[in-house]
């Protein structure tokens, strides 16, 4: 069962039940979040509103790192997730989300793309140690 964005039913403050005036529309149904992690490459393809397609990374081993000093973008291997400001639990589980700091073969990099929706992982090499 998919979760809903809207709450059509529910209860009144007195405890009485509210009856929905209409049923959910397809566009009002939300999906469970896709939480990409380290592992063998696995990309899911899903149809979204308007007949468009979103590529969602389930597992991946590599990312594209942009080194601003050398002005090069290099595909490199992810070693581990060092810090994830979005969620402390994501940091513990090693979830790759936008803004996460990952340790790569080139050094510490910060993810700037949305791997759960883009289908690729792009990052910028940082000088700081996370």
Image (cartoon, grey):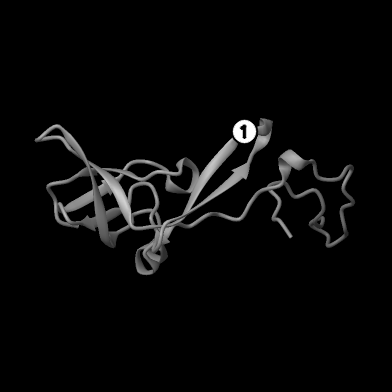
Q: Quadrant of the N terminus?
A: bottom right
Query: Residue 115: where, in percent of width, then height?
Result: 43, 47
- Residue at image position (83%, 60%) is 14
Q: Secondary structure at mark 1?
A: loop
Residue at the limit of the structure toward the left, as seen here? 69
Query: Residue 81: where, in percent of width, then height?
Result: 29, 61
54 relative position to 12: left or right: left
- Residue at image position (67%, 33%) is 51
The answer to which of 41 and 21 lies nearer the viewer is: 41
How many other residues sit within 10 Å of disc 1, few (<14), some (14-19) or many (≥20)?
Answer: few
Residue at the limit of the structure toward the bottom, as seen here? 92
Q: Quadrant of the C terminus?
A: bottom left
71 relative position to 88: left or right: left
109 relative position to 50: left or right: left
Q: Which residue is mark 1?
A: 52
- Residue at image position (72%, 42%) is 28
Query: Residue 78: where, in percent of width, then height?
Result: 27, 57
Query: Residue 65: where, in percent of width, then height?
Result: 24, 43
77 relative position to 97: left or right: left
Residue 124: quarter of image: top left
- Residue at image position (87%, 48%) is 20
Residue at the limit of the structure toward the front, as seen here? 41
The total number of labels drawn is 1
Residue 17: quarter of image: bottom right
């Amino acid at each position: 069962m998919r979760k809903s964005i809207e709450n059509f039913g529910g209860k009144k403050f007195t405890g009485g039940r509210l009856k929905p005036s209409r049923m959910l529309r397809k566009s009002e149904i939300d999906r469970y979040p896709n939480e990409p992690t380290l592992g063998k490459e696995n990309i899911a393809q899903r149809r979204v509103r308007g007949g468009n397609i979103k590529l969602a990374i389930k597992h991946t081993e590599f990312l594209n790192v942009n080194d601003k000093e050398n002005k090069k973008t290099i595909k490199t291997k992810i070693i581990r997730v060092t810090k994830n400001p979005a969620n402390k639990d994501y940091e513990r589980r090693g979830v790759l989300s936008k803004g996460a700091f990952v340790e790569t073969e080139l050094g510490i990099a910060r993810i700037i793309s949305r791997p759960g929706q883009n289908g690729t992982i792009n990052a910028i090499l940082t000088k700081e140690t996370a």
